[in-house]
Image (tube, grey):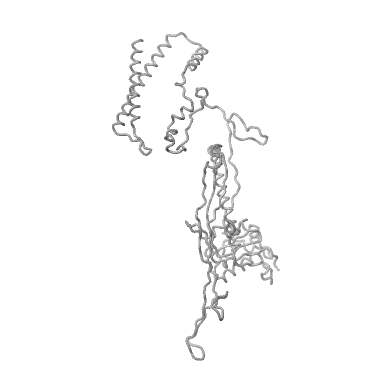
Amino acid sequence: MSQDKSRLNELQGALRSKMADNKAIADSFRVEDGTVVVTPEQKTAFDKNMSDIKEIKSLIDGMQAMDSVESWSSQPTETVAGSFAAAAAEVSQLTSSEIKSIGEMFLESAEFKSLANGRNGANMVAPWQVKASFTGGIQVKDVYSAIPNTNVTGSRLGTFGSVQRDAMVTQPMRTKRVRDLFPVRTTTAAVIEYFRQLGFTTPIQGGYGFAAGVNSASTVAERNGANNAFAMKPQSSFSFVGEQAPIRTLAHWEAAHRNVLADEPQLRSIIDNELMYGLRLLEDDQILNGNGAGENLLGVLNTPNIQEYAWSSGATSPVADTKADAIRRAATLSFLAYYEPSGIVLHPNDWEDIELTKDNQGQYLVAVSVAMGGEPRVWRMPVVDTPAITEGTALVGAFGTAAQLYDREQASIRISEQHSDFFVRNAIVVLAEQRLALAVKRPEAFVKVDFDAEPS
């Protein structure tokens, strides 16, 4: 036995020597610009020592195991209570150097050391993970966790046993978007400057100014007048007005606990989708109804010089005009401005009236193709029915050529804990944001239809 103990002491001394050598090698490593520089010789020596350390440690563990078995076989049988008491006594005799507190482990962690005493800033690259809970130096694990929700009476949904959680039923989303009628370009500018063309003008007699008129193009004789002089050609001119379309920001955010989003991926997905959907709803409203004040877009319906058509002004003989008739007559105004209308925006209730319009025999007049699953169209134009436009109002126009949307930043989701005191509350901000501009370059190509007046 004494020979075995002597051999064990020799192995332990060799182990301590090898570990001291490796520590000296590690201390000699250089750090340049945050990177550890190790020479081939240092790496070879370090690896060889580690191999020797593992071999010596294996021999020590084997000898200690043999010694433990031999000692146990020579001792009388102990009771469970006695074994527990002996183990408790061993724990109570442990010194503070043998049991490290969580604070000591944190200070020795690679995550804390990455701060380099403040030289690398105040934020760790990654959070330090506590592997398990520590109570009085004894490592333990949680065996119970309450369900993080309550029922309608305020009591817990349950304690023990398995829980089946059904998927949430999300609200339906609007599928048709006003944006789909417009051409879209990307930009890196903060302001879009453009010229709005007001149409043909004719010269004012006896002056140099110009007044609103029509195209003056005409046939011209080679000579005319009493002296048979060369004929004067008529003058036409285009009139332009310089305009600006500033980039506007559409955004909103939601607060959430970081643990909730980490533990419930479905909630994270719903929050992201709802925030993005909220931007789409606001975008449709701004494109149509923005008043241009403050940070609002100047929407099409509030753009100066767009045309208007009132339903009550339609023909009434031999049959009163329907809403579909009013749409067609508005399209004519766009055609007369030399722009072919490319779309219609309607409130769902007005679109319902048009689809359900019947003749005296009860036959549908417009909605036959739609009822059979065709694309919603009226008078060859695609229809976007959306609550973004006020009921009783419709918009007909050349969306594809007379106006332009500019995307400065497409809609995106960002997450941060750097808001107010969110960091110390373990909360985060989920932010949805987009930036865009709208330029209506030819307002006369758009016609606002008023359905509120009863047909005469």
Q: Quadrant of residue 398?
A: bottom right
In this rendering, the answer to whether 176 lies above or below 101 is below
Which quadrant of the rendered structure holds the C terminus? bottom right
Q: Residue at x 57, y 61 (%)?
A: 382
The picture places residue 143, in percent across and down from the top left corner, at: 55, 27
| Residue closer to the observer: 119 or 287 | 119
> How many numbered markers are drawn?
0
| Residue closer to the observer: 419 or 130 | 419
| Residue closer to the observer: 115 or 79 | 115
The picture places residue 76, in percent across and down from the top left corner, at: 46, 8
| Residue closer to the observer: 166 or 283 | 283
In this rendering, the answer to whether 455 lies above or below 87 is below
The picture places residue 422, in percent across and down from the top left corner, at: 55, 39
Which quadrant of the rendered structure holds the N terminus? top left
Q: Residue farthest to the bottom? A: 226
Q: Which residue is drawn at 47% across and 18% down?
A: 94
Q: In which quarter of the image is residue 444?
A: bottom right
In the picture provided, is 305 more to the left or to the right than 92?
A: right
In the picture provided, is 429 more to the left or to the right than 314?
A: left
The picture places residue 208, in percent across and down from the top left corner, at: 54, 78
In this rendering, the answer to whether 209 lies above or below 130 is below
